[in-house]
Image (cartoon, helix red, strand yellow):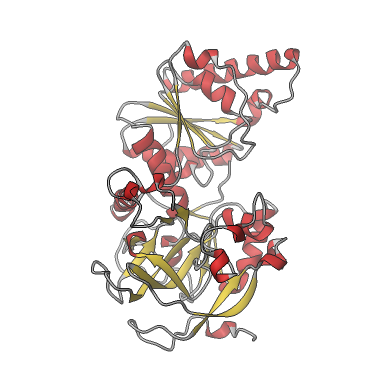
Amino acid sequence: MAVDLSKIADVATEPGEIPATMAAWVIRAEREGEPLQAFQLEEIEVPEPAAFEVIVRVMAAGVNFNNVWAALGEPVSVFGYGDHPQHGHHIGGSDASGIVWKVGPGVTRWKPGDEVVVHCNQASYEDPEVHGLDPLAAPSQRIWGYETTWGSFAQFAKVQAQQLLRKPASLSWDEAASYGLTYFTAYRMLLDRAKLQSGQRVLIWGAAGGLGVFATQLVKAAGAESVGVVSSPEKGELARQLGAKGWIDRSEFAGMMRRGDESPEQERERFKVSRAFAKRVSEILGEPPDIVFEHVGRATFPTSVYTVKPFGKVVICGATSGYTLDFDVRYLWMRQKEIIGSHFANAWECTQANRLIEDGLIRPVLWRTMGFDQVAEAHQLMHENKHLGKIAILVGATDEGQGRTARGPGAIRAEVGA
């Protein structure tokens, strides 16, 4: 059945009652491939909320690279795990802002009509790790909208009640949908895992990228100093605007990037460039960094381990250049440095981080807002690396800027990238 895109912002029911069907961008196993092929509009039955679940009317959604992977079926298909075998389809989207439309049994904190932002960590309430250790340690832990279906690229999304956060009143719907996955990841990396303290010094790879723009602001807000690695002077100025003490154009030190197949002579030359880079970092910060904010992986990790100060910490949440790491471990054990893994954030960390947005201490950085009819196109842009920053998708909202109910700084509109 064809979906009438002109009716996407219209909902026939009032809060408290869900309609029978909704429009959704759906991926199915038989059409995995390029996002323009994999994402197709379908009319889907709206799910009922189970115990401690909530149905949210999506006003805007955020685009992340995880649903490029879902479209491609790489590095693994999403259809073999999570709730996909049960439902047979994937509705992606791991960032959303919207309105609580219906609550399931047991939900008392939220009611229909509440304006919310959704964080993307899910876990079973029955797992003991959720109640005292950390939901990220639970065997049931999943990233909503990637490892689960019923994500935000639809008129309605199904979430756990613990995923809901109060929408910052000074942000529009599209701004409020733009920050969750990357910002909350950066918050946990720095504040919880690396224990960032006032007065410390931090090296941030990709300081003008999706993670880096928040890492830079968090370091500043904590009373610490950072130096950012970027890909152009324009992005260096953005990093400075966001609070960095200084920046380094990575092209000046291109020889430090590790490929993994260097000969001994090539490795010696690479290491010379890494030493020069570390010296520049120390010159800008006044001494070597206490923390290195890592997400690049193979290309930069040897330099990160070398550059961080003795007893310092390298905290890593991903590996965009490759996850097989090869580095000189002598600089780790002899100088007693730490490598710390980090993955997204729990509900408490998301709540604390969201308060900084509400208070205007941290600002989203948004490149472009696109229409609901452009979900597949947005992911194709990201797949082909033709995007220049965070993309938000209007769903229930009809125009940019809708949803703002208080004065405040709002999002920074900028082209960003590593």
Residue 219 visible? no
Q: Residue drawn at (44%, 49%), measured in percent from left and top? A: 139
Q: Nearer the viewer, residue 148 or 85?
A: 85
Quarter placement of the C terminus: top right
> Image height check: is 66 above or below 174?
above
**Horizontal relation, residue 406 to residue 283: left or right:** left
**Horizontal relation, residue 390 to residue 19: left or right:** right
**Image position, residue 269 (x, y; %):** 70, 15
> Image height check: is 416 above or below 367?
above
Q: Nearer the viewer, residue 72 or 172?
A: 72
Asked where in the image residue 260 lies, by quadrant, the reply is: top right
**Image position, residue 204 (x, y; %):** 49, 33
Quick one: which residue is furthest to the left in this view? 108
Q: Nearer the viewer, residue 223 or 412?
A: 223
Query: How many marks do you count on the picture?
Result: 0
Residue 272 visible? yes
Q: Residue drawn at (44%, 47%), measured in percent from left and top? A: 344
Quick one: which residue is furthest to the bottom in this view? 12
Quarter placement of the N terminus: bottom right
Q: Residue drawn at (44%, 53%), measured in percent from left and top? A: 140
**Image position, residue 327 (x, y; %):** 60, 21
**Horizontal relation, residue 352 to residue 326: left or right:** left
Asked where in the image residue 78 lies, by quadrant, the reply is: bottom right
> Image height check: is 46 above or below 362?
below
Q: Nearer the viewer, residue 168 or 320?
A: 320
Asked where in the image residue 107 lies, by quadrant, the reply is: bottom left
**Horizontal relation, residue 396 to residue 133: left or right:** right
**Image position, residue 414 (x, y; %):** 52, 52
Quick one: which residue is furthest to the top in this view? 334
